[in-house]
Amino acid sequence: MRDLLRLLLLTLTLVLGACNLSNVPPTPTPTPPPLPTARFLFPDNESIVVEGTALDIDILASDDQGSGIVRVELLADDQVVKEGTPDGGQAVSPFRVQMNWLAQGVGRHTLTAIAYRADSTPSDPTTILVNIIPLDEATEEVIAQP
């Protein structure tokens, strides 16, 4: 009889412990808004540029669900070379910025754009590759084309 009573108490404890009688829905986990974005409109990835040329760069940054864009950085080979801000210093979205970079150093280089919100939240970096060729190679390519 005692064993039966113990088994009954154990079963009752397990059943009551497994019950969730709360009618309160769980609190949703807050999720931050998506990160801002930056993308190159110009030049195209893998563009060929003649050394010593001022390369025009066009970047579009947006922050659809945040506070807007206050700054866009342009990096060449992981070094900040230019920075663009909206007129008046106010956060805007979308924000289009045009800047240039002097193509130096024959070979392959990375150009990276990063957009920032007012609270300094950065976008994921967007990177393209540019191939810088010497002037004499560029002249040979132009002459070889019909």
Image (cartoon, helix red, strand yellow):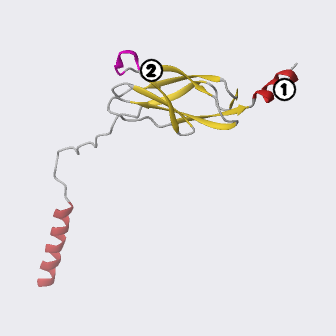
Q: Earlier in the sequence, mark 2 or mark 1?
A: 2
**In what element is the residue under mark 1?**
helix
Dot 1 amino acid type:
Glu
- Up-down relation of residue 121 to residue 21 (above or below): above
Judge whether residue 111 can be spotted in this image: yes
Real-space Cα separation, disc 2 to disc 1, in angstroms: 39 Å
Where in the figure is residue 119, as x and y percent of width and height?
32, 32
Q: Nearer the viewer, mark 2 or mark 1?
A: 1
In the image: residue 108, left or right of residue 16:
right
Residue lying at 63% horizontally and 37% vertically, measured from the top left:
109
Q: Nearer the viewer, residue 32 or 38?
A: 38
Residue range in magenta is: 86-91
Q: Is residue 124 magenta?
A: no
Quarter the N terminus occupies: bottom left
Compared with residue 120, is residue 69 higher up or lower down, i.e. above or below?
above
Q: Quadrant of residue 142?
A: top right
The disc label shown at residue 48, or none: none
Task: Classify 10 Å Cα crowding around label 2: few (below 14), some (14-19), many (20 and above).
Answer: many
Q: Position of residue 55 (x, y in %)?
A: 62, 23
Please give the name of the residue rendered at 47% of the width and 37% of the height, measured from the top-left corner: 124
Residue 79 image point, x, y percent: 52, 38
Mark 2 — residue?
95
Disc 1 target residue: 140
Q: Residue at x 19, y 71 (%)?
A: 11
Residue 14: quarter of image = bottom left
Location of the C terminus by quadrant is top right
Residue type for callout 2: Phe
Up the image or down, 94 lies above or below 45; here it is: above
